[in-house]
Amino acid sequence: MRVFVAGASGAIGRPLVRQLIAAGHEVTGTTRRPERAEEIRAAGAEAVVCDVFDREALAAAVAAGRPETVVNQLTSLPQRYEPRKASFYEETNRVRDVGGHNLVEAARAAGARRFVTQSISFLYAPEGDWVKSEDARVFDDAPGHFGPSVRILAEHEREVVECPDFEGLVLRYGQFYGPDTYFAPDGHLGGETRSRRFPVVGAGTGTFSFIHVEDAAGATVAALERGAPGVYNVVDDEPAPMREWLPVYAEAMGAKPPRRVPAWLARLVAGKPVAANALQMRGASNAKAKRELGWTPRYASWRQGFREALG
């Protein structure tokens, strides 16, 4: 199959390209940085240096690749994980909003039959059950800087799934760990954990769903040919509250056990929305993805993944 991957040099784009090539697909991958193009070629794919905000150039690049499937892995996250700051979200919001729309239009014009796009599994409203299926309400009224991000993602999801010109699939990935992620040993949260600046907040009830980048890539490969149009949570088998996973993560980082701080102090230091996530975030169920995509994560639990992939 001919596959066009937008964002082929990112944390998930790199393992995705490798897995696509290994599966026998013909891949064209984009990057904004000329120095990353050689990495894409070295993996066995065609490389295109392209700005997703340039509609004509993007359309020409997609058309030249003659893709049967277009995969959107576009993000622009900063090196530091600082969700209290508006700047943490701004560039990725623009990439997902404007760049995502431009890619949809380019895929339509090129006659792609399938479009697979990334989203996040931690966008569910903090209400009701602690583990959510894909039909649960998204947190589009979230306070602070996260609210606009959720609304942009929800609109992009809608555009993809409802497009009449291709089969649109949305993959709501869990919290990424593995190389080039915030949770990597050399990532920002890895460093914060070793410095004991990443605490358990209050009762630590916020429930997180994780996914290793290799497993996220594997689900994406599966989505090229399997699964009806719609939304899929791509997470591991064990959603877990912060009080359970953070000590295990700290151990994997070779750090002392994380400190515990009261919720009022977290609200003061990190901001109300960030503190609320640590107490109220909902996890996600992968039952639909396993059933309909025929996919099973290699790391069934973050317990195994943190120990084997981060230690």
Image (cartoon, rainbow, N blue to C red):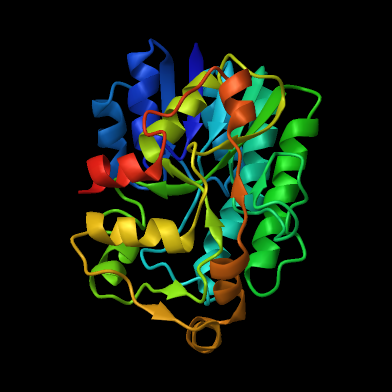
Which residue does the image show at 51% across and 39% down from the upper left? Answer: 235
Q: Nearer the viewer, residue 198 or 181?
A: 198
Q: Residue at x 42, y 15 (%)?
A: 26
The picture places residue 15, in percent across and down from the top left corner, at 34, 32
* Residue 200 screen position, x and y as percent: 43, 71
In the depicted view, which residue is nearer to us: 249 or 11?
Answer: 249
Q: Is residue 47 visible?
A: no
Q: Residue at x 50, y 68 (%)?
A: 204
Q: Relative to 167, is 93 on the left or the right?
A: left
Q: How many marks?
A: 0
Q: x%, y% of residue 159?
A: 76, 39
**Quadrant of the image occupied by residue 256:** bottom left
Q: Is residue 168 visible?
A: yes
Compared to residue 198, the image places residue 235 above or below, namely above
Question: Which residue occupies 34% across, 77% down?
Answer: 259
Residue 271 vertical placement versus 125 (above, below): below
Using the image as rendered, state which of residue 20 and residue 106 is in the foreground: 20
Q: Is residue 196 positioned above or below 224 on the image?
A: below
Is 94 located above or below residue 224 in the figure?
below
Residue 213, percent from left and from top: 39, 39
